[in-house]
Image: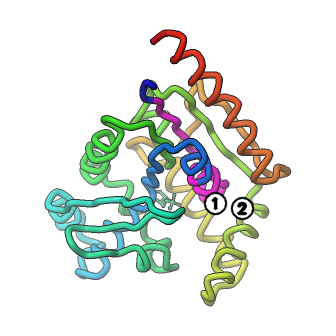
Amino acid sequence: MSKIIVAIDGPAASGKSTAAKELANRLGYVYMDTGAMYRAITYLAQKNGIADVTDKVIEMTRGLDIVLNFENGLTRVFVGNEEVTEFIRTPEVSAKVSEISRIPEVRTELVKTQRRMADRKSIVAEGRDITTVVFPNADVKIFMTADLDVRSDRRYKEFIEKGMNVTLPDVKENLSKRDEIDSHRQVSPLKKAEDAIELDTTDLTVEEELQKITALIKKVELNKSHHN
Ligand code: DC
C-alpha cells in the first residue's frame, strides 16, 4: 500500500495527541509528536542554562540528534544517547517552550528531521504547523479545536493522574499563553490551513473523534489503492 500522511494541528490540549496516538496504533502508522521535539530542545536549553540566549539555542539545536521512538502507546524521546522523555512535560518546560519555538532556525532544523521521519512510512503527525508548513500536501489534514475550559480540564486531569502538583487556573493560563504566542509568531504560526477539516472536540468523546478521522483516512486509503 502506498504511503499516507495524516496531519493534525490545533491549540494546546485540543486532543491531538490522544487522537493521533490511537490512530497510529489502530492503523499501524508511525506517530510523530512534533511538540515533543520542541519540548526536548527547551528542556536541554534550560538544563544548560542557555534558554534565554537565542544564538546558543540555535547552535545547540544544530548539533542535536533527536529521535522519537513510539512503542506501546508511548513516545520515548532521545537526544543523542540521552533519554529525556520524563523531563519534557514539566510546568517549567511548558512555560518556556513557546518562546523557544518562535526561533526560526530552531524550526528549520526540526522540520528537516520531521520530513525525514515521513520519508518511507505512513505517518500521523501532530503539532502547530504540520498542515501548513511541514506537510502541506498531506493526504488528510485536520484542525482540531475545543473550548479553553474543556482543554484546561483535560490537561489538568492528566497532570493529576501523573501525580503532578498543579492547579487548574495555572494550567489554563499556560494553555492560553502558549496559544497566544503560537498563533501570533512570525514564522509558521498556528492557523487553520485552508483545506484542513476543522474538528471541534468540545462535545465529542475520543471514540467519536476517532471515528470521524478514521472515515477520512479510509477514504484516502481506498482511493490510493485503486490508483495503484
Ligand atoms: O504539542 P505540545 O503542546 O506538546 O507542544 C508544545 C509547544 O511546542 C507548543 O506550545 C508550540 C510548540 N510547537 C510548535 O511550535 N510547532 C509544532 N509543530 C509543535 C509544537
Q: Nearer the viewer, residue 137 or 5?
A: 5
Point out residue 51 in the picture as x, y percentages from the top left corner.
Answer: 30, 73
Q: Is residue 216 above or below residue 29?
A: above
Q: Is residue 29 left or right of residue 206?
A: left
Q: Is residue 83 left or right of residue 173?
A: left
Residue 158 is drawn in which quadrant? bottom right
Which residue carries the number 1 mark? Answer: 13
Q: Tag 1's secondary structure?
A: loop
Q: Which numbered marker is on residue 64?
A: none
Q: Nearer the viewer, residue 68 or 191?
A: 68
Q: Nearer the viewer, residue 141 or 183?
A: 141
Report the amino acid beneath label 1: Ala
Residue at point 56% right, 51% down?
25
Q: Nearer the viewer, residue 4 or 139?
A: 4
Crowding at dot 1, Cα within 10 Å, few <14 / some 14-19 / many 20+, comes out as: many
Q: Which numbered marker is on residue 151?
A: 2
Q: Are marks 1 and 2 in contact (CB under 8 Å)?
A: yes
Q: Is residue 117 above or below residue 74?
A: above
Point out residue 196 in the picture as x, y percentages from the top left corner.
Answer: 60, 29
Q: Tag 2's secondary structure?
A: helix
Report the amino acid beneath label 2: Arg
Quick one: quadrant of the N terminus? Answer: top left
Q: CA distance from mark 1 to mark 2?
A: 5 Å
Q: Is residue 67 left or right of residue 171?
A: left
Q: For residue 76: magenta?
A: no
* Range drawn in magenta: 4-21
In the rendered image, the residue lying farthest to the top is: 227
First of labels 1, 2 by sequence position = 1
Q: Is residue 213 above or below residue 182?
A: above
